Image (cartoon, rainbow, N blue to C red):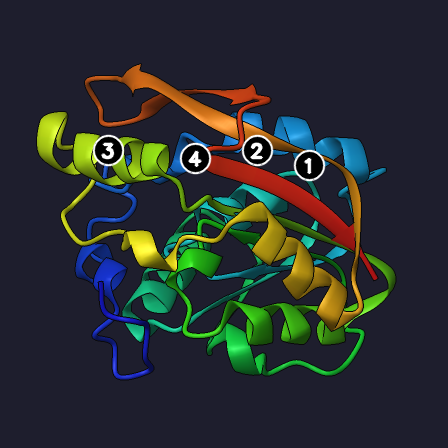
């Protein structure tokens, strides 16, 4: 896929207008919230009142999920179309969420602005994951938490995350992922350490067991890190 730019040739912006539709092709992205936050919640004492930034927020699935938990949420994405869709839906549903167009490698926020930064299904799409992690560390307050998931670069992930979803069950649009951009856990750990973040806890994976008629996925937390894996680090 093309790397994201502010000129909005970003792949997922194609689905901005239908992002929140009942039959949206993006419904599969929201399916990862249950296992994702079952894991993340172990490292967050409470969400209510916390200043949270969601990097690569897309049309707003995670930002709205966190707003409903009482967090003070900001969302950032390189796609003006996706930010417009996210902002529109938040206003339609009465949610106060601050949305900004911008890139993860140059976050438009002051140092130490957030208690928590989430970055899910994003780092495998950015131009420089290492720079994105450095920027995330910069905007985290001392003691702040970075919560992420990304995709491991393995033979299995090429099969499970690209070939099957794109060609067999056709739940992911072609071009959504590029295998060479996937990130091995040891590479991710190096990005964290080089940025001055301390990995905490044990990484966990997310397994996909099938799909439902509405396009959502059946997902569960797993110890297998060969495909999608989650991690946590602290400043």
Quadrant for the N terminus, please. Answer: bottom left
The mark nearer the N terminus, 2 or 3, is: 3
Quarter of the figure with residue 81: bottom left
The spot of residue 187 in percent (x, y) is 58, 57
Q: Which residue occupies 54% across, 30% down?
A: 205
Residue with the mark numbered 2: 36
The spot of residue 113 in percent (x, y) is 76, 73
Which label number is shown at residue 227?
4
The spot of residue 37 in percent (x, y) is 62, 33
Q: Is residue 136 above or below residue 72?
A: below
Q: Which residue occupies 40% across, 36% down?
A: 30
Measured Cα–Cα span from mark 1 to mark 2: 6 Å
Which label number is shown at residue 197?
none
Q: Quick check: 214 left or right of 108?
A: left
Which label number is shown at residue 22?
3
Residue with the mark numbered 1: 40
Secondary structure at numbered mark 2: helix
């Amino acid at each position: 896929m093309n790397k994201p730019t502010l000129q909005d040739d970003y792949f997922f912006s194609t689905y901005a207008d239908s992002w929140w539709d009942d039959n949206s092709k993006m419904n599969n992205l929201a399916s990862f919230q249950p296992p994702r936050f079952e894991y993340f919640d172990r490292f967050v004492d409470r969400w209510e009142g916390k200043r949270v930034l969601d990097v690569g927020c897309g049309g707003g699935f995670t930002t709205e999920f966190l707003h409903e938990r009482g967090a003070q949420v900001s969302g950032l994405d390189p796609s003006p179309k996706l930010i417009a869709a996210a902002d529109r839906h938040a206003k339609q549903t009465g949610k106060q969420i601050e949305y900004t167009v911008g890139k993860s490698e140059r976050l438009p926020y002051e140092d130490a602005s957030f208690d928590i930064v989430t970055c899910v299904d994003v780092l495998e799409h950015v131009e420089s994951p290492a720079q994105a992690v450095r920027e995330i560390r910069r905007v985290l307050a001392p003691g702040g938490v970075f919560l992420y998931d990304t995709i491991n670069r393995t033979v299995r992930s090429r099969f499970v995350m690209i070939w099957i979803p794109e060609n067999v069950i056709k739940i992911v649009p072609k071009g959504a992922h590029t295998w060479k951009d996937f990130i091995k856990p040891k590479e991710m750990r190096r990005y964290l350490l080089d940025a001055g973040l301390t990995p905490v806890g044990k990484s966990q994976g997310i397994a996909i067991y099938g799909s439902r008629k509405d396009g959502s996925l059946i997902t569960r937390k797993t110890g297998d890190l060969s495909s999608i894996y989650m991690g946590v680090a602290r400043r």
